[in-house]
Image (tube, helix red, strand yellow):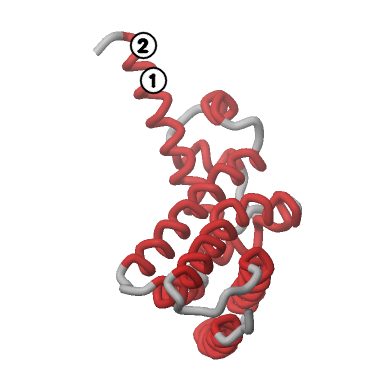
Amino acid sequence: MDRKSRKAEHAAATRTALLKTARRLFAERGYAATATEEVVRRARVTRGALYHHFSDKRDLFKAVFQEEEQKLAARVTAAGACESTPWNRLRAGCAAFLDACLDPAVQHIVLIDAPSVLGWEGWRDIDAGYFLQGIKVALQAAIDAHDIAPQPVDAAAHVLFGALHEAAMMIAHADDEAAARRDVSGVIERVLAGIRSAAA
């Protein structure tokens, strides 16, 4: 392995260590209570290494948030892939998304801290990039398969996207998260039933 390759490998390992450590601390303590000094110490890297990869704590958080979104999107996709019809894939994906909201890391990083750290619009833009298009594709596939009535896909996707995220916020902020998850499940099923029976 040449010097350039070793340097790139070391840089990648350093970035991975920072992200892994930051994720653990953000999930346990939240953004405000996590100091960059603690991230650096636990990741066993220098402060200079942190600022080589990230401009500041907010930039580090944004990278952790995006990784969390990628994992969440993969989890939703995997749940849908187990189903045989487009409509059931959509329903399974919605359920998997709500189940993931019981995970403390998803709660603290994605639902509680991200909107305040990144700003509502910044958070929503990133989140929509991972999920809104997927909902549109799933709805269109269900229409094409005659699982649901033809309808304005863009409007239906935005309504479902909004309902899922309000449900997620309710779970994340609830005193009894499991009970909130059960409550929102029935509501989301009714929203889906309304979409399925929508007139052309």
Q: Cβ–Cβ below 8 Å for labels 1 and 2?
A: yes
Residue 22 seen from this side: yes
* Rendered location of residue 91, percent (x, y): 46, 77
The answer to which of 87 and 11 lies nearer the viewer is 87
How far apart are the alpha carbons under marks 1 and 2?
Answer: 6 Å
Query: Residue at the spot x=59%, y=51% of the render?
Result: 129
Residue under pointer 2: 4
Toward the front, the furthest residue is 200
In the rendered image, the residue lying farthest to the left is: 1
Residue 53 vertical position relative to residue 30 in the rendered view, above or below: above
Q: List x then y, in percent, for residue 169.
A: 64, 73
Say which amino acid is labelled 2: Lys
Residue at disc 1, secondary structure: helix
Q: Is residue 87 toward the left or the right of residue 166 in the image?
A: left
Quarter of the image with the N terminus in it: top left
The spot of residue 75 in percent (x, y) is: 40, 62
* Number of the label disc, if any, that sits on residue 8: 1
Query: Quadrant of the image for the C terminus?
Result: bottom right
Residue at x-position 54% and y-position 83%: 196
- Name the element at disc 2: helix
Q: Residue at x 58, y 39 (%)?
A: 37
Q: Is residue 180 in view? A: no
